[in-house]
Amino acid sequence: MRIGVISDTHRITSSIEQLGGLIKGLDLVIHLGDNVEDISIIQKFYKGTIINVKGNCDFCGKTPNDRVEEIGGKKIFLTHGHKYNVKESLDKLRYKALETGANIVLYGHSHIAKIDFEEGIWYINPGSASLPRDGDRSFAIISIDKEEIEPNLIRF
């Protein structure tokens, strides 16, 4: 299974359209917020399932702040990250990962792409697909094959 992870698209249509061409063949797409309305643009390119959480720039009442999903036999905790102070440290996310039993934690908010592996848990920030603070726009692809988890950052 190949999962695309996107965050912080911020209504930048040209970036979202370019991203759309890069995610067409994936099995699932996850949007981590800021701006979940951009999913309507992504759906022009990607016809599969998209799951999402809202970020600090999203004001839609129905979208959850956090969620736990079982995907490819792995428990994945999804959050935008602003409620966990991810710009300061990952400490609050670590506690949440342990509390939820997550194998993978997905978060955004900082606009800085990063992958960490600590104590058997993957922490993946796909960066920003539109307004990066670390160079190029980015997203992540996570490949899950039985027990194997392989995350990669894709710069574009």
Image: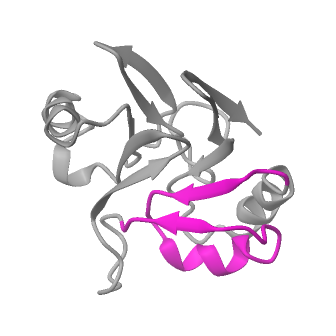
52 vs 140: above or below? below
89 vs 10: above or below? above
Please tell me whether residue 40 belongs to the stretch shown in magenta: yes
Image quarter where the C terminus lies is top right
**Residue 53 seen in render:** yes
43 vs 146: above or below? below
Relative image position of residue 45 (x, y in whole percent): 83, 69
User: Left or right: 23 with respect to 21?
Assistant: left
User: Left or right: 20 with respect to 82?
Assistant: right
Q: How many marks?
A: 0
Write down the region rendered in magenta. 25-54
Furthest residue to the bottom? Answer: 61
Relative image position of residue 9 (x, y in whole percent): 57, 61
| Colour mapping used in the image | one colour
Please tell me whether residue 75 belongs to the stretch shown in magenta: no
Relative image position of residue 37 (x, y in whole percent): 54, 80
Residue at 73% in and 75% down:
43
Residue at 79% in and 65% down:
17
Image quarter where the N terminus lies is top right
Residues 122 and 154: in front is: 122
Residue at 64% in and 30% down:
153
28 vs 37: above or below? above
**Residue 106 seen in render:** no
User: Left or right: 37 with respect to 77?
Assistant: right
Q: In which quarter of the image is residue 99?
A: top left
Relative image position of residue 94 (x, y in whole percent): 20, 29
